[in-house]
Image (cartoon, rainbow, N blue to C red):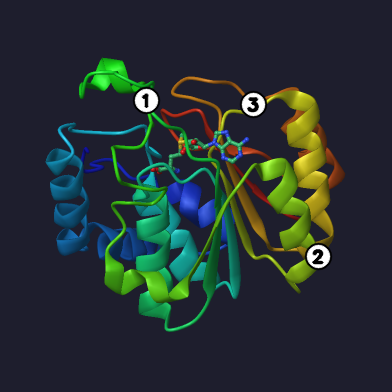
Amino acid sequence: MRHELDPDAGWVAGLSNCPNRRASELLRQASAERILYQHLAREHAREGRASYVEIDAPLELYALARRLRPRHVVEVGVSSGVSSAYLLAALDRNGSGTLHSIDLPSFPRAGARRTASAHGSWTLPPGRTSGWAVPFELRKRWDLRLGDKQAVLPLLAEELPAIELFVYDVPHEDKATFREFLCLDPRMAAGAVAIADHGPNGGLCEALARWARKRAATPLRRTGLGLFGFRCG
Ligand SMILES: C[S@@+](CC[C@H](N)C(=O)[O-])C[C@H]1O[C@@H](n2cnc3c(N)ncnc32)[C@H](O)[C@@H]1O
């Protein structure tokens, strides 16, 4: 697990409609969550690996959740729980809000050795389940659902009154992705923010370019990453 050294204040400011100064201040708060960072790094090391596939901009997620003060955050793709932990830490500091996370756990092949290559990029260590590195004390605001996004997202769309922040950090495929964003769309009012990862250097996929046009949201790229954000119009 790496400590993020170059968070993008302009990206947070653009997505959450606040001055750069305020975004920088929130990113400093995120960076100061040293106990959380050390806990996650220790848990990863305990399982014999320095890192699992994780979001490259956890500090920005924290800052967005602090700034937007969401009642409901939806996240797809949990793995060991780096993004979940930073979102939960922000909600904890806000004193309000729930994180609804969806993950389809992935298990190592039987007989695979306990090494990074044998485990693939996000498979679970033995005896663990999705979000295994998230500190226990942050879990009270967490609604973690294990299942396929295609089955769980429609349930959340039915259950939640509104979604102010949506984080999509899962392998995607155009048709399904567009359908899944459309499914949450009625719950995302103007000012709601969606984040989607397209891999380290990925460009914006056609599905989300189309969804962004529908929502009058200019896609904003996080500097240096394939991570795009959209502020709903
Ligand atoms: C890139 S990792 C998520 C990383 C995580 N956001 C973090 O910061 O640590 C993607 C996760 O999506 C899960 N996944 C893959 N296909 C899925 C599906 N169809 N529905 C739900 N989750 C899925 C994988 O098991 C994996 O845990």
If the image is split into quadrants, where does the N terminus sit?
A: top left
Image spot of residue 52 (x, y percent): 31, 33
Q: Earlier in the sequence, mark 2 or mark 3?
A: 2
Front residue of 92 and 13: 92
Find numbered disc 2 in the image and state the secondary structure of the residue it sits on: helix
Mark 2 residue CB less than 8 A from any atom of ligand 1:
no
If the image is split into quadrants, where does the C terminus sit?
A: bottom right
Front residue of 207 and 129: 129
Find numbered disc 3 in the image and state the secondary structure of the residue it sits on: loop
Q: Are marks 1 and 3 in contact (CB under 8 Å)?
A: no
Residue wearing tag 2: 158
Left/right of residue 34 with respect to residue 194 in the rendered view: left
Q: Earlier in the sequence, mark 1 or mark 3?
A: 1
Up-down: is 165 above or below 220?
Answer: below
Q: CA distance from mark 1 to mark 3?
A: 22 Å
Left/right of residue 172 with respect to residue 143 in the rendered view: right
The numbered dot on residue 121 is 1
Kind of residue at disc 1:
Ser
Find numbered disc 1 in the image and state the secondary structure of the residue it sits on: loop
Q: Earlier in the sequence, mark 1 or mark 2?
A: 1
Q: How crowded is the residue under tag 1: few (<14 C-alpha within 10 Å), some, or many (20+)?
A: some
Kind of residue at disc 2:
Glu
Q: Of the residues tagged 1 and 3, which is closer to the observer?
A: 1
Up-down: is 231 above or below 88?
Answer: above
Residue wearing tag 3: 204
Image spot of residue 42 (x, y percent): 13, 48
Up-down: is 22 above or below 166?
Answer: below
Q: CA distance from mark 1 to mark 2?
A: 32 Å
